[in-house]
Image (tube, helix red, strand yellow):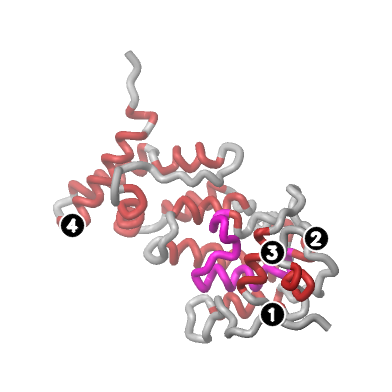
Amino acid sequence: MTKRKQVKPLKAKLEPDHPFYSIIEDAYQVFCYDTPSSTEVCVGCCMDREIEADFFSPPIRDLPLHYLQDWYFAAYDPSGVSKRTWGYLLPRVLEVLAAGDDPAMVGLEVSLNRFQTGVRENWSDAEWAVLNRFQRAYLERSMSQGEDYLDDILCMFGLAGWPLQELFDQVSAFPDELLVRRFHRDWCLGRPTIWITAFWERSGNTAAFEFYTSRRMYERFEMLAFDPETNPDLAEKAMQVASVIVDFASWTQTSD
């Protein structure tokens, strides 16, 4: 029998009073997959050998964070892992994210992309209901909390298969004040710039950039900045964000 390496209290576990607790509990209920027979990552090389041998020994609820992070560190087939393996691990992955930790130490953006998590057709109605709740709650929380850039979070969901336009529509639906404060923190602390993560694939980075720098987004912030009812601090932030958009937007560029 393999000696368990985990001796310390589990990290990235939610208490019942956590805002995401009910979502994660539902995840453990609906994603009650059988234990896989394979980790579906590089064997005998990338993972710590003790962790690899013990990976499926603890119940999924008790999978140590460093086990999961070691699994993410290992190489895997570029086409992804099977639904069976991913569905088994997914509740714990979601819990780690909800707890504010990164399953993949290389970057938040790759946390959900080893299977097309955001493709509705891949899941039952009950499974999708949990994933949809989680995605929306996580994005909403990110607007006012956490250290990650908004673009990193949109990239995480985009790489996992959530349609980009749906994600952009969710962002657009947030109140102007919340958007201004979020973009000001992402773009205006330090050298002003539009933050775009390097993890985007295909045309995702272009789509995200065009969304952030759209004329519609600029006009929202400009109106807020010049509205006499806007408090001075928020008006100043709105003007700074609008100025960044003007500096980088393609529609402001003129040809000779």
Q: In the rendered image, which residue does mark 1 sit on?
A: 5
Q: Residue at x 33, y 28 (%)?
A: 252
Q: In the rendered image, which residue does mark 2 sit on?
A: 43
Could you say which is closer to the camera, residue 223 or residue 24? 24
Queried whether the magenta region covers residue 87, the answer comes back as yes
Q: Residues within 10 Å of mark 2 (few under 14, many from 20)?
A: some
The answer to whether mark 4 and mark 3 are in CB contact below 8 A is no
Task: Specify whether 44 is left or right of 157.
Answer: right
The answer to whether mark 3 and mark 1 are in CB contact below 8 A is no
* Amino acid found under the numbered disc labelled 1: Lys
Could you say which is closer to the camera, residue 115 or residue 217? 115
- The mark closer to the camera, 4 or 1, is 1
Q: CA distance from mark 2 to mark 1?
A: 18 Å
Answer with mark 2 or mark 1, whichever residue precedes in sequence.
1
Q: How far across and how far down the image is residue 64, in percent?
A: 64, 76
Which element is circle 3 on?
Answer: helix
In magenta, the rendered stretch is 86-109
Q: CA distance from mark 3 to mark 1?
A: 15 Å
Q: Residue at x 45, y 40 (%)?
A: 209
* Amino acid found under the numbered disc labelled 2: Val
Q: Residues within 10 Å of mark 1 (few under 14, many from 20)?
A: few
Task: Specify whether 254 is left or right of 116.
Answer: left
Q: Residue at x 44, y 59 (%)?
A: 148
Which element is circle 2 on?
Answer: loop
Task: Specify whether 109 is left or right of 64.
Answer: left
Which element is circle 4 on?
Answer: helix
Answer with mark 3 or mark 1, whichever residue precedes in sequence.
1
* Amino acid found under the numbered disc labelled 3: Trp
* Amino acid found under the numbered disc labelled 4: Asp
Could you say which is closer to the camera, residue 254 or residue 125? 254
Q: In the rendered image, which residue does mark 4 sit on?
A: 233
Q: Is residue 49 above or below residue 42?
A: below
